[in-house]
Amino acid sequence: GSPNQRPARNLFRTSPARMNGADAFLTLRLLRGAGVTIAATNHKEPLMIIGYAAGAYDLFHYGHLEILRKAKENCDYLIAGVVHDDVLEVTKGRRPVIPIEERAAIVSHIDYVDEVHIETTPDKLETWKQKPFNVFFKGDDWKGTEKGLALEERFAEVGVEVHYFPYTEHTSSTKLRKVVDLLEAEHDLRAEMHRFAELLGDREYSEAIIAS
């Protein structure tokens, strides 16, 4: 199996001999798409809720952990979509601090996550075709917006519900990225001042910069 996928486990609540949740959902969708009738059983089983939580998960922090925890509380099987560096560069205008391989590895070790999917397209419907799910988790900063409503409409056509979570303001990768940028800028400035002092032959000034 995929190195990002955990061993299959009993995900159906009422029957032990079942395939894992993602494979079951995909198989049923393919059978129905081919016109195969699924016979009803004598007892009803609850629908397997396969959730999908997408994100960059760059500079992983408590806010990310909370998103995944809340997502897992609202589904049976959680797929975490980790967005590829190239896609982030196109959609956000810059590459992440942590490369995709490391971000995917970090997220795969979170207990709430059953499977990691590396997103190579910004189109969420295309992602759904690659890795089927029936609930899509999103921060509520999209709720009621034009892009949020468009996302809901597109997903509704394929039977996917958009579930919103309160946006976490306390900690964000954007804030952490700014701190990293400031530290890097300070380091670069000190290096330039040190080089400039050496060019001028001012040893005392150079040593003062290093000491500060």
Image (cartoon, helix red, strand yellow):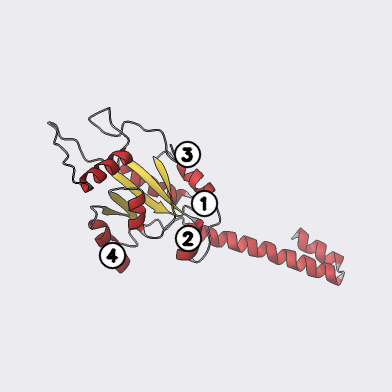
Question: Crowdedness of circle 1 by 10 Å Cα count: few (<14), some, many (20+)?
Answer: many
Q: In whole angstroms, how far apart are the C-alphas of marks 1 and 2?
A: 10 Å
The image quadrant of residue 155 is: bottom left
Give the mark, 3 or 4, whose residue is nearer the N terminus.
Answer: 3
Q: Residues within 10 Å of mark 4 (few under 14, many from 20)?
A: few
The residue indicated by pointer 2 is 88
Q: Secondary structure at mark 2?
A: helix
Q: Is residue 130 left or right of residue 196?
A: left
Residue 8 drawn above or below residue 93: above
**In the image, what residue type sits under mark 1?**
Ile
State the image coordinates of residue 120 (x, y, percent, origin top left). Answer: 44, 55
The structure residue drawn at horizontal position 78% and vertical position 65%, both measured from the top left corner, is: 194
> Viewer-nearest of labels 3 and 4?
3
Q: Earlier in the sequence, mark 1 or mark 3?
A: 3
Percent position of residue 146, x then y: 30, 68
Query: Mark 3, residues whose alpha carbon is within 10 Å: few (<14), some, or many (≥20)?
Result: few
| Mark 2 to mark 4 CA distance (whole Å) | 21 Å
Q: Which mark is residue 153?
A: none
Q: Which residue is mark 3?
A: 3
User: In this rendering, does residue 107 appear at all?
Assistant: yes
The residue shown at (39%, 40%) is 114
